[in-house]
């Protein structure tokens, strides 16, 4: 995948919900098996709560179980010179 293609991928952490992935990417499991993604869909949502019956994809279970998770990144320590 080219640097331009990688730069076109956008991942958004949804408040108390899934990871929304947009752009050209390949989704594979730990063994290298690739999931077929719908060509007509501009994004997919990946489960963060662990309760989806369609894992790794989100099925909205986070709402049913009351999943809560902060969406802001943790502050990074400033490296010492």
Image: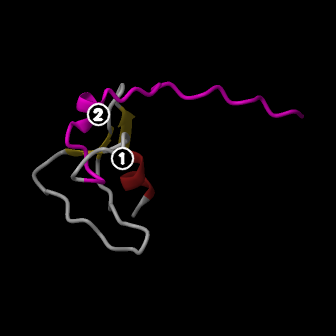
- In which image quadrant can residue 27 be found? bottom left
Element type at marker 1?
Answer: loop
Q: Which label sits in the foreground, 2 or 1?
A: 2
Image quarter hosting the N terminus: bottom left
Q: Does the magenta-highlighted stretch encompass residue 18?
A: no
Q: Is residue 59 above or below residue 54?
A: above
Residue ranking furthest to the right: 81
Indicate the position of residue 59 as horizontal and vertical percent values. 20, 43
Q: Residue at x 41, y 53 (%)?
A: 6
Q: Is residue 2 above or below residue 17?
A: below
Q: How many marks?
A: 2
Q: Residue at x 10, y 52 (%)?
A: 40
- In which image quadrant can residue 2 be found? bottom left
Q: CA distance from mark 2 to mark 1?
A: 24 Å
Element type at marker 2?
Answer: helix
Residue highlighted by disc 2: 62
Residue highlighted by disc 1: 9
Q: Residue at x 24, y 37 (%)?
A: 61
Q: Which residues are magenta?
A: 55-81
29 on left or right of 81: left
Indicate the position of residue 4 as horizontal and vertical percent values. 40, 52
Labels 2 & 1 near each other (Cβ < 8 A): no
Classed neighbour count for the residue bearing mark 1: other residues with Cα under 10 Å, few (<14), some (14–19), many (≥20): few
58 on left or right of 68: left
């Amino acid at each position: 995948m080219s640097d331009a293609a990688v730069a076109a991928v956008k991942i958004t952490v949804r408040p108390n919900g899934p990871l929304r992935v947009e752009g050209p990417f390949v989704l594979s499991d730990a063994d290298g098996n690739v999931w077929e993604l719908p060509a007509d869909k501009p994004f997919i949502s990946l489960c963060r709560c662990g309760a989806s019956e369609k894992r790794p994809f989100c099925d909205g279970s986070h709402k049913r179980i009351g999943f809560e998770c902060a969406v802001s990144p943790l502050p990074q320590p400033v490296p010492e010179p």
